[in-house]
Structures are given as C-alpha cells and as structure tokens.
Image (spheres, rainbow, N blue to C red):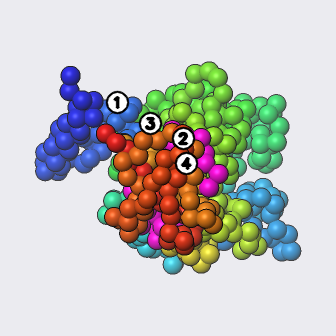
Amino acid sequence: MMNIFKKGSLMIVLFAMILLTFHANGQTIQEISKVEKLSDDERMEWWRDAKFGMFIHWGAYSIIGGERGEQIAGGGAEWAMDKLDYTIEEYEQFPNMFNPQLFDADEWVRMAKDAGMKYIVITSKHHDGFALWDSKVSDYDIMDASPFKRDIIKELSEACKKQGIIFCFYHSIVDWHHPQAQGNLFPNYNAGQKDQSVVNPEFPKYYENYLKPQVKELLTNYGDIGVVWFDGDWIADYTTEMGKELYNMIRKIQPNTIVNNRVDKGRNGMEGMDKAGEFAGDFGTPEQEIPATGIDSDWESCMTMNRTWGYKPDDTKWKSSEQLIQNLIDIVSKGGNFLLNIGPDGYGRFPAQSIRRLKAMGEWTKANGESIYGASASPFDRPEWGRYTKKGNVIYAHVFDWPTDGKLIITEDLDLAKASLLVGVGSELKVEKNNKRVIIHLPEQAPDEIATVIKLEFKK
Ligand code: FHN
C-alpha cells in the first residue's frame, strides 16, 4: 500500500498541477479552491506547519490609546468605547479622525515575515463596529466614515499575497454600533457583555442582515482567506445554531478556509478549548495563556507582547524577547500555534518595542526554524532544562537552562545515533548512555542564551 505520506505528497503535486493549470487560464486560486475541496487534514496542513502568526488589533481605538483625559482604560485599549464611557455619538468622532497616513501594508507584512511569522490575522471589525474594508452593507467603514478612504483589508491582503504570507481576518460577532446588535439595550450597547440574561430580540436581524453579509463580503472580495478568527461568541443573543450556520456559510464560499472555535458556543472561557458536545470550529483558542501540557487537538494561543491588544502607550509591561521566543517553543512543544499580537498606533506604525521583539524573534527563528516549522508536540514529559519538539525521526532539545557542568541529562531511554548542535550544523556532541538515561556533553558556553537547540537523531 502506498505510504500515506507519499500518497499525500502525490495529492499535493496533483493539486499544485491543477492550480498551475487553472492559474495559467487566469482563474483565481479562490475559484480553484471551490473546485478542490481538501480533506480536513489537507486543509489544516499549512496552518499546522506554520506554527507562528501575527495578530493585529487596529482600528479607530488606536487613536485613543486607551486614554480619556486623566482616565486610563482598564484592560484592552480596543475596549476604549466601553471602558472610557463613550456614547455611540461621542465615539463616532474617532473613525471620523482615523487617517493613518503612515500605514504601509508591505512594510507590515515584511516585518511579520522577517519575524518568522507565516500568517497574519487582522481585526476587520472589532466590537466598536468600525469596518476596515469597503463594506457595501454599512457606511460605518474606512471608505465612508473616515478621511483615509483606502481599503485596509484590500491593501494588506494584497501585500500578504505578494510576500507569500497567508492572509486571515478577525471578526467580532459583538457590535456596539449597530442598533439591531443591541436592540432594546440601545444605547447601553454593552449590556449583553455584562449580563448573560439580557436578551435582545433584534439580534437575529443583525445576524441575518449585517453580520452574515459582512463576513460574506470579506470572503468574496479579498482572495483566499486562510483563517476566519471570530470573537465575541460570549453574548447570550448569539446562538449555537447561528454559529454552525456561519461556519457552513464560510466553508461554502471558501471550502478550504479554516475557522476558529469562537464561531460557535463551545469555547470554555479563556482556556479556549471546546467543552464536551458538538460545536463548529477547527481549532481551540487559549487566550493570554499556554496550556499546562500538550493537547491532542488543534489549538492556537493568542497573546499580547505587553498586556493589551490595542495600542496603549500607558501599558509598559512588555514581555522580553527571551520570554516570547521561549513561549513559541513551549507552545510548539505542546502541539499548538502561537498568534502574537501587534497593536499599531493611530498613524499606522508598529510600536518600537514591538519592532525590537519581532526582530529578535526573527533572528532566532531564522537560525532555528527547523525545530519549529512543521514540528509536532514532544512525545516526552517536559524536561527541567527546556522543551522538546519532534519532526519525523528527529527530536529537537531546546535548552533554556544551560547545565553548569556541561552535561545535559536526558531522562528518556533513547537509542541515539547522533546528537549535534542545530546551529553550527555538524557540531557533533559526545553522547554517553548511563542505565536508562542519556548524557550529552555540551560546550561550556550556550551558543544561544535564550534557547540552544540540540538535534537528536535516532538509530533507524
Ligand atoms: O474582547 C476581545 C479583546 O478585545 C481581544 O480582541 C481578545 C483577543 O482575542 N478577544 C476578546 C477578549 O477575549
């Protein structure tokens, strides 16, 4: 029987040939993807291999920066409308001022790519309801409500395509601007957030006449969409029936698009995985946390570099580059993806602190990406000194804490053919077997202070 991997690669070659053929005839990949409905494993493959993506929270709230006079918004700056007590009318001034003349989609994508990120998820619309694309079902968008009058989703999706980064979008089910999204709660637009018993009889009309049409626009007019990343699943007005219908609608328009579990009602709070039951969605979404152990299903931890998603100068609690690199390794060692957030400012600039961290992550992933991209979860318990990842017949030992005596103890009964430093390839290391443990003799100094990778190859 043909090896499953050979069969899979044959399928991919055939699919690539179909793409090239159709492409030569001028059809878009999107049209082709309607023809070639991939299996779930084939559809998830790029995402499972990618491991590392950029989250971008950007919108009118990026002008506010989480501040109103002497008041600082508690929590996310993207919640400014609610946290800083703006009425809808007061808040509408910000889209009217949103004119990010320094926005450069090509530059944003280059920074993501250079950081080792393989996909970008941008907020097409956050809870404030302001759309960053040219929506035909609303004037509360970048083309009609702001002086910028450029389709940000279009520019970013085209820049991604040019640079080989997968374009994805975040979309909020919650909408604090649309009257039917709040119905009789109006103007108390966020009542549904605070009190699950609050019912808004108008919500189904918002869902049918606004939410679905806007998602449809994004899936129809901006080429292939890698992932639709829903948020706002928590409000009681949004039902599991709506979630399942929305998921099926997306898969009908673009069969190979991946959708997170916040499209439905299965998510178990911030730990992000689905509770028992049948819910739509292709991966779990732990938020601001990394699961304690590996999880044998698809999941992605989303995390900020400081503590807030939207731009907030007052938030100076930046995670170190070391912490972010070790988070990536930890997540991959547990079988997950890392979606790391950038909150650009109201001019369209990435914060300097973010740029520095992206560069540091790019240097590490450029040198050590073999142990990350396409790797799977460690088959072993977590060692005290770092993390393992696995790829085929190779285990990658990521050493965070370099042993002072130069001896790396592996408490697994391994039958190693070879151990070598991944960087400075060919630097074979002495391996000693002692009962059921392996001792690897290391150089005195760690080649990489943050995480040095040792490649462990096994006897065939
Ligand atoms: O309320 C949002 C928040 O603003 C941010 O978008 C995060 C990112 O996943 N999701 C929600 C909070 O869980």
Residue at the spot 45% in from the left edge and 54% down from the top edge: 431
Residue 139 placed where, x, y %? 55, 56
Q: Which residue is mark 4?
A: 410
Mark 2 is on which residue type?
A: Asn
Q: Is residue 265 visible?
A: yes
- Point out the tag, 3 or 2, that comes first from the N-terminus: 3
- Point out the tag, 3 or 4, that comes first from the N-terminus: 3
As drawn, the residue found furthest toward the right would be 70
Q: Which residue is mark 3?
A: 250
- Residue labelled 4 has its Cβ within 8 Å of some atom of ligand 1: no
Q: Which region shows up in magenta?
A: 361-385
| Residue sitting nearer the eye, 29 or 94 | 29
Give the Cα distance between marks 3 and 4: 46 Å
Q: Are marks 1 and 4 in contact (CB under 8 Å)?
A: no
- Numbered badge on residue 39: 1
Q: Which residue is mark 2?
A: 435
Residue 236 placed where, x, y %? 73, 32
